[in-house]
Amino acid sequence: MRPTTTNTTLRALYKPQLLRRTFTTSRPHASRLRQPGEPTGPNEPPSHISTPPSKSPLKVWPIVGIFALGSFLFKKIVDQRLEEAAYKPQGPVVGMPAIGNLGATTRTSPLWSPDAVTVIFVLGGPGAGKGTQCQKLVADYGFKHLSAGDLLREEQDRPGSEFGEMIKTYIKEGTIVPMEVTVQLLENAMKASMAGDNKKGLFLIDGFPRKLDQAHAFERTVVPSKFTLFFDCSEAVMEKRLLQRGETSGRADDNMESIKKRFRVFVETSMPVVNDFESQDKVVKVSAERSPDEVYADVVKMFKERGVEPIKLKLVQTQNA
Ligand SMILES: Nc1ncnc2c1ncn2[C@@H]1O[C@H](COP(=O)(O)OP(=O)(O)O)[C@@H](O)[C@H]1O
Ligand SMILES: O=c1ccn([C@@H]2O[C@H](COP(=O)(O)OP(=O)(O)O)[C@@H](O)[C@H]2O)c(=O)[nH]1
C-alpha cells in the first residue's frame, strides 16, 4: 500500500539522520572513539566519574549577559510605552483642555436630559439686540446668560490659551470658530454655573449655534434645546446699531469691514440653523426693530405661550393662591 511504502521510505531516509544528529549534537565523536572508562578528552575525567553539566563561566556568562541586557531593554521599552499611554497633554488651565483633548463633542449621548437642564438658544444677526434682551430675561426669569461670543473673547484673552490666536482670527474675519472649542467652553460654563447658584440649570445661550454642525453637536452631546428665540432685524438697522456700539465696545469686529463679513456669514451659515429649528417647530420669532422694551414685551408674551413664566410672576401667583 502506498502509505506503508511512503512510511518505510521516510523512515529509511530520516532515521539515520536523526540518529546522527542526536550523536553529533550531544557529544561529537564520543560513541566512535571512546572506550568504557576512557576519558573523553585531555581535560575531562573518565566517564565513570560523574561530572555536572559544564559550568564554565565562559559559556554561561555571555548567555546570562545577553538575557539580562535583553530583559533590561524590554523593561525600558515597556516602561516607555506605559508612560506614553498615560500621558495626556493638559490645557493651560483646569477647565479648558488642550486641543487634542476637547471631549465635549465626542460623546454619543447628551450629558443632561432636557428635563433636568433648560436651554433656550438666542439667535439673530449681529447687532439684532440678543445681548440686550438676554439681560432683561436674566433679571425676570432667573436664567443664566451664556454668550458664546463673550466666552470666546474671554478664552482669546486668557494668558496661555492655546486657542487665543485662532479665536482672534475667526472673530476678526467674522467666521465661525471650530465647534469643538465653543461647545467645550459652553459645557464648562454650564457645569460651573450649575455647581454654583444655578442648581435648576436654566440657560439662555446667546449667539449660538451659528452653524448646523454646532447645533447638532450641542444637542447630541450636551442637551437638546427647549426652543430658539430668534430676533428678526434688517441689515440696515443692525449696521447702524453695530457702528454705534463700536464707538465704545472696543471689539475688533465692530467695524464696517468685519460687519459686512459677519452679515454674509449670518445669512449663509447661521440662517440654515434657524430654518432647521423652525422645521422642528422650535423657533420663537420676534421682530427686533422697535425699542428694547417693546421687543421685550413681545418676548415675554411668546415665552408665556411656550409655558415659560417669569420668576416674579410665579411669586405673585403663589402669594395670591
Ligand atoms: N431694540 C433696540 N433698539 C435700539 N438699539 C438697540 C436695541 N437693542 C440693542 N440695541 C443696541 O444695539 C447694539 C447691539 O445690541 P446687542 O444687544 O449688543 O446685540 P447683539 O448681542 O445681537 O450683537 C447695542 O449698542 C445696543 O445697546
Ligand atoms: O458660536 C459662536 C459664537 C460666536 N462666534 C464668533 O464670535 C463673533 C462675535 O459673536 P457675538 O455673538 O459676540 O456677536 P454678534 O456678532 O452677535 O454681535 C462671531 O462673529 C464669530 O466670529 C463663533 O465663532 N461661534
Image (cartoon, rainbow, N blue to C red):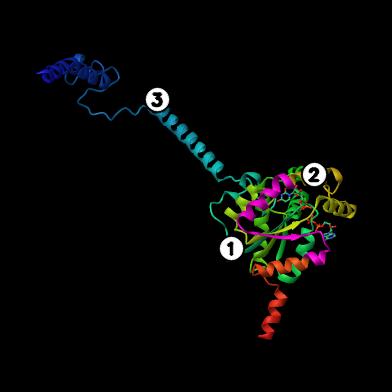
Residue 69 horizontal side relative to residue 46, left or right: right
Asked which quadrant contains residue 225, the reply is bottom right
Amino acid beneath label 3: Leu
Q: Residues within 10 Å of mark 3 (few under 14, many from 20)?
A: few
Assess whether mark 3 and mark 1 are in contact (beta carbons under 8 angstroms). no
Q: Position of residue 219 (x, y in %)?
A: 60, 55
Residue 58, disc = 3
Q: Residues within 10 Å of mark 2 (few under 14, many from 20)?
A: some
Name the residue tied to disc 1: 114
Give the mark nearest the N terminus, 2 or 3. Answer: 3
What quarter of the picture does the C terminus occupy?
Answer: bottom right
Q: CA distance from mark 2 to mark 3?
A: 75 Å
Q: Secondary structure at mark 2?
A: helix
Q: Which quadrant contains ligand 1?
A: bottom right
Residue toward you, 171 or 75: 171
**Range drawn in magenta:** 266-295
Please determine whether, in this image, residue 272 is positioned above or below residue 135.
Answer: above
Residue drawn at 60 percent across, 58 percent down? 224
Q: Is 10 one of the magenta-colored residues?
A: no
Specify few, some or many for label 1: CA neighbours under 10 Å numbering under 14, 14-19, or 20 or more.
some
Q: Secondary structure at mark 3?
A: helix
> Can you tell which mark lies on residue 172?
2
Q: Is residue 234 visible?
A: yes
Is the stretch drawn in magenta largely helix, strand or loop? helix
Q: Position of residue 14 (x, y in %)?
A: 20, 17
